[in-house]
Image (tube, rainbow, N blue to C red):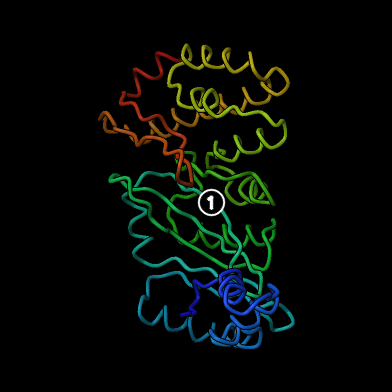
Amino acid sequence: MPVNHDTTPALIQEWYRDRHGPCSYKTAQRVRNQLIGNSQSIQAEQFTYLPSYINQILALDPNAIARLRIDPNNRFANLFICPSSSRHAWQHIWPFIALDAAFTKVIHHYVLLVAVGQDANKETIALAWGVAPVENYEHWAWFLSNLNDALTGLNQSSTVLMSDRQKGLNLAIARLLPHATEAYCCKHIERNIESKYKIDISVKFWAVVKACTRTQFETKMEELREDSQEYVPSLCATLLTVIVLSITCIRYLTSTGRTLHFPPIDMDSEPQILLSSRTMSIDKLERSLS
């Protein structure tokens, strides 16, 4: 069978078992590492090339922000990259950034930190990314500090930063970007509620999130209360924040008096955009919520 970086140890294990008999997962993993050069020593060697990698980026893209942080023991600590194309794009897209992290699929279990936005064509734009040993306050703070240097106007009330509120990110936002408007990812909120209370609230929850008037919000919240008396009070406060967030975004984006067409919330993709898919002016929305 052909083996490449997309081949998992489980696939090798299954292929061998079907043809030759039992094979442990650990053995299949060792075979995969040998075939594609994914051994720990080979991966560790790649870290020595990072200074040259940063220099090459800056040589080819002088306006990029590319930074490498080394710890006191002369070992890798953090990496941050924001291309000049992303810096330029930020000036022309909605002032909305989603922040998240994901584990890398390598032997050295580092975390990929990302900041993404969305343009008027509903296309996702990777604004910046970085690598850290773990997801915590220290590494998010370093990432956000560099992000603030790279993107003009980040620390303003008109800029919305969406996060999952976990592992030091919310604290880093509060300390590094105190003037930005913080929002919470409704997809994560939904998952956390369903995981904690073992209740399926998907349909009614998203009906509340998508409400774009106070009347609609209260009606949908009442329907949600019928099924979820335990946690609705705290959830209500979070969802009211979503409405305030929508007003903040619309006030900034409609400074020219134009009516905006917001993208629909896509339940199957992440990050989730916490804005209504309806079209309305800021005056109409504010009147409905007054």
Amino acid type at mark 1: Leu
| Quadrant in the picture for residue 231 | top right
State left or right for residue 204 relative to residue 228: left
How far across and down, in percent of the image, does residue 90 sit?
37, 54
Work out whether residue 137 or residue 100 is closer to the camera in this orientation and state it. Answer: 100
| Quadrant in the picture for residue 82 | bottom left
How far across and down, in percent of the image, does residue 54 sit?
48, 80
Where is mark 1, residue-wise?
A: 99
How far across and down, in percent of the image, does residue 191 sit?
62, 38
Please tell me which residue is depicted at 66% across the width and 38% down the height of the picture: 192
- Above or below residue 72? Residue 256 is above
Question: Is disc 1 placed on a helix, strand or loop?
Answer: strand
| Quadrant in the picture for residue 198 | top right
- Above or below residue 47? Residue 195 is above
- Above or below residue 174? Residue 243 is above
Please tell me which residue is depicted at 58% across the width and 72% down the height of the picture: 18
State left or right for residue 1 relative to residue 285: right
How far across and down, in percent of the image, does residue 234 sit?
68, 25
State left or right for residue 198 relative to residue 48: right
Work out whether residue 115 or residue 64 is closer to the camera in this orientation and state it. Answer: 115
Please tell me which residue is depicted at 52% across the width and 16% down the height of the picture: 220
Work out whether residue 106 or residue 121 is closer to the camera in this orientation and state it. Answer: 106
Query: How many numbered marks appear?
Result: 1
Please tell me which residue is depicted at 62% across the width and 74% down the height of the picture: 17
- Above or below residue 185? Residue 211 is above
Tell me the crowding category of disc 1: few under 14, some 14 to 19, or many 20 or more residues within 10 angstroms, Cα based. Answer: many
